[in-house]
Image (cartoon, coloured by chain):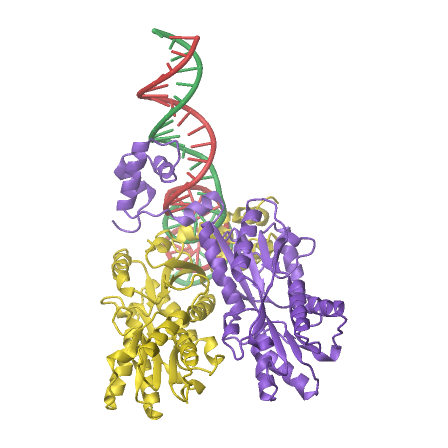
Chain colours: A yellow, B purple, C red, D green
Amino acid sequence: MKGKATSFDIAHYAGVSQSTVSRALRNSHLVNEETRKRVFDIAKKLNYKVDKNASNLRTQQSSTLALLLFEDPTSDESQINPFFLAMLGSITRACAKEGYDLLVSFQSASADWQADYEDSHRADGIILLGYGDYIDYQPKFNTLLEQNTKFVCWGATVDNRPDLTVCCDNYGGGKLAAEHFIAHSRTDCAFIGDASDHSPEFFSRFQGFKDELLANNVKINERKTANAISTEESGYHATRSLIANNIKFNALFAASDLIAIGAIRALKEANINVPKDVAVVGFDNIAIASYVNPPLTTIEQNTTIAGQMLVENLLKLIRGEDVQSTLLPPVLISRKSSS
Amino acid sequence: MKGKATSFDIAHYAGVSQSTVSRALRNSHLVNEETRKRVFDIAKKLNYKVDKNASNLRTQQSSTLALLLFEDPTSDESQINPFFLAMLGSITRACAKEGYDLLVSFQSASADWQADYEDSHRADGIILLGYGDYIDYQPKFNTLLEQNTKFVCWGATVDNRPDLTVCCDNYGGGKLAAEHFIAHSRTDCAFIGDASDHSPEFFSRFQGFKDELLANNVKINERKTANAISTEESGYHATRSLIANNIKFNALFAASDLIAIGAIRALKEANINVPKDVAVVGFDNIAIASYVNPPLTTIEQNTTIAGQMLVENLLKLIRGEDVQSTLLPPVLISRKSSS
DNA sequence: TGACATTATGACACCGGTGTCAGGAATTTA
DNA sequence: TAAATTCCTGACACCGGTGTCATAATGTCA
């Protein structure tokens, strides 16, 4: 036998037509039990596998989802944000559970990525994953919508289509951080992340934080906030600049764990003790968080559930079913960095 | 325009045949420059994308590689080994650079995974990635070889086919660890990993470690070794049992960083200071390693290069070119856990 | 026994490209 | 001017399945 076996080969050996083989292999009730068994036996002997390309071409679908990972363009090329890696893991698992393959691809935010996967019939739908300048994405979202491409995204909101987004309740997460500080009587708070609305996730976290503080009659001073993207380096530098400007605080909420880890490094360097002098709370609960010194208190986003929801919602969209907007509840994980 | 545009649509608007469109889009020199331009313009206007299924079916290849990730079946379901996640990231990048898509799939070691991807024409080749009981895989490797499936694997050796393996020089890495201890006059050494040959990577690390010690007239006592799989928990328990058995040592080589991190936890709990009482060296240099307390000295495996080599070698195999066995040089990263 | 439903199968068009072959038009050569 | 060559294009088979339709064989009922 040269090359791979086809359904015609099976048909030949089984003494039936190729149509019957195709039906038999897909367990059509239209085929006789005895014939079906014979076909299966021969298929197994020939190590036959359905040609996905032929099958997909005919049925116009692919049983494949595409995951586009957008990296913060300014972040270090060699390291991928561990939060996204965790998401990738859970998305992969969720896909497998649903019988879908997963195509993974890293993208830069600026690239001309829209639709390529779905238009070329490589995937039935797309999952978009990334932090960053989501504002720039809206035109691309519109293109996707126009072309009726099925997609869901993590974090970013799509105008008028809340159902396409799965994200953590960032606002609620920010409130949790504030509650925690208040419970520990740390009311001189700083925030590192992005207090502008350029990065909507960070912005929501800050809003929730600020609002909950206000609800407890605590005001956060604008000067005690600094911008940072989600890297350790960026958190380190932002914190250093606060310290250099002689800004005082006894509690620090970082918009992500990586920022928090960088912040702790900067604090240590300045001989500021964590948590005695400054309590630190991060966001994400990446794997590293429990290993740093001191172990990091953080707002957990459950990546397992998040990945499942992204996949489930996307499959619903593909099947034409209704999808609800999905907000995942954050949970505060208390460790030593804040007590 | 209902549905997606096909090459026939373009042909219609351009007033040429579908054949010409196909040729034009693939920049065949057989097509007139003017015609080519017209076709491109219309394709762009219609947002045309080549149907991958049709194209793959005809050309009998897929421009896709499959990555099968084997997880240690005994490890915690919810957390993926960060070393593999790093590899996944670099493999993804390498694929993108070569113009290939990447299908990612998690597998349990026991499953009937062989060949499914390549036989069904979903991928042109397969990358196998995992620690673990590679011995069990040999029959499956044989099946793959028989079917002429193109594959490469990380770590595991395939009988008589060294060219199919990309791996770190584990033996050399073990020697580096030994050299380091000797340079710091820590000669009472323990090893945690797997000193049996069940796990060939760990075994090689141990051999290199042992041999280099011997070359310096230091003998490692068998009682000072303990088995562990590559998880923090396993490293923790293995170390606890050493301590419980009252085994003394002033240097500890762990076969992976996760094991080392667990070991440090156990040592701390027993009030054994790292590095003063016991110097610890791990293996892998995962991202967490530099954040733990104390920061972990470790033998780095360069995942960026490893991913590139896996992809490059696999593509060579697919193209029918010769491939050399690939051993990557490990590098010792010195941090506070060992000095 | 004829009308009709049920079951199992084969023939065939089709999905959307790619590659081969034949041939017309334009250009060069004898 | 006829022959040869080059350039460009269209017709068509093909990749390997899936789905529709026609039909033969068998069973059911009046």
Let me know if residue A36 appears in the view: no
Write the residue at 65% across / 70% down. B180
Residue A173: x percent and y percent? 33, 81
Query: Count of labels shown?
Result: 0
Left or right: residue A329 compared with residue A102? left
Residue A109: x percent and y percent? 34, 59
Residue B290: x percent and y percent? 51, 73
Which quadrant would residue A104 be assigned to in this image?
bottom left
**Which residue is at the front of the view, A209 or B98?**
A209
Left or right: residue B192 compared with residue A258? right
Left or right: residue B150 compared with residue B185? left
Residue A233: x percent and y percent? 40, 70
Above or below, B335 relative to A214: above
Write the residue at 32% across / 32% down. B33
Let me know if residue B25 appears in the view: yes
**Which residue is at the front of the view, A261 or A317?**
A261
Which quadrant would residue C24 be assigned to in this image?
top left
Q: In which quarter of the image is the C terminus of chain B?
A: bottom right
**Which residue is at the front of the view, A13 or A176?**
A176
Write the residue at 34% across / 85% down. A251
**Which residue is at the front of the view, A49 or B32?**
B32
